[in-house]
Image (cartoon, grey):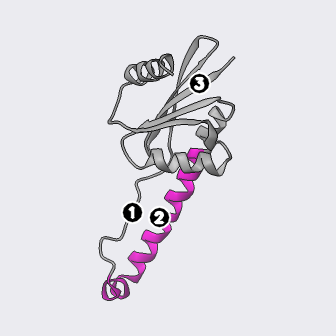
Amino acid sequence: MKKEVGLWIDHRETVFVTIENGVEVVRKIKSNAAKQVLNKKSTKAYDAKNKDESGSKEMLNRKFEKNLNQYYDGVISFIRNADSILIFGPGKAKVEFENRLIENQLGEHIVGVETVGKMTEIQISAKVRNYYSHW
C-alpha cells in the first residue's frame, strides 16, 4: 500500500502527517537549532574593529547549520520510505529540506512544495488529507 506524507516545516519544528493503509498518524519533531546569527555590517573596518564578535557569530552560524542538518536528517529518518512527500511551510526551511531530500536521493518522491503560514495540527492534517484525496 502507498505511504503518503505531508509535512509543515520551519527551523523550529516539523509537523508531519503520514497516511498509510487508510490510517493517518500525526507526529511532531522539535529542532535543537538556535536562532541563526548574522553580521548586520560587513565592512572591512567593522570586521577589523570587531574581530572577536565576528568570529563568535561565525561559530554560532556554523553550529546553527550543523544542528539544522541534524534536524533535517532526523525528519528524513521518519519519512525515508514514503512513496510521496508534500512539503509546506512559511520560510526557507521547506526549500532547504527539499534540497536535503534531493541530496539523499529522495527527490523523486517530492510531489509538491508550497508556501503557507503558521498552521495548527488540525489544519496541517486536513491539508494533507485533502491534497492526497485529489491526487
**Nearest to N terminus: mark 1 or mark 2:** 1
* Position in image of residue 103 (x %, y %): 64, 52
Q: Helix or strand or loop: what does disc 2 sit on? A: helix
Residue type of the residue flagged with mark 1: Val
Residue type of the residue flagged with mark 2: Leu
Q: Which residue is mark 3?
A: 4
Q: Which residue is mark 1?
A: 37
Magenta residues?
43-72
Instruction: Please tell me whether residue 71 belongs to the stretch shown in magenta.
Output: yes
Instruction: Please tell me whether residue 56 belongs to the stretch shown in magenta.
Output: yes
**Nearest to N terminus: mark 3 or mark 1:** 3
* Position in image of residue 8 (x %, y %): 45, 34
Please give left or right for residue 51 compared with residue 132 in the image.
left
Q: Helix or strand or loop: what does disc 3 sit on? A: strand
Please give left or right for residue 118 compared with residue 92 in the image.
left
* Position in image of residue 23 (x %, y %): 59, 12
Badge number at residue 98: none
Q: Which residue is mark 2?
A: 60
Q: Nearer the viewer, mark 3 or mark 1?
A: 3
Residue type of the residue flagged with mark 3: Glu
88 or 47, nearer to the observer = 88
**Nearest to N terminus: mark 3 or mark 2:** 3
Please give left or right for residue 44 compared with residue 33 in the image.
left
Marks 1/2 in contact by CB < 8 Å: the verdict is yes
Q: Residue at x 40, y 83 (%)?
A: 51
Q: How far apart, in angstroms, are the residues tagged by discs 1 and 2?
A: 7 Å
Please tell me how crowded label 3 is: few (under 14), some (14-19), or many (20+) other residues with Cα within 10 Å.
many
Residue 10, placed above or below residue 68:
above
Quadrant in which the N terminus is drawn:
top right
Please tell me how crowded label 1 is: few (under 14), some (14-19), or many (20+) other residues with Cα within 10 Å.
some
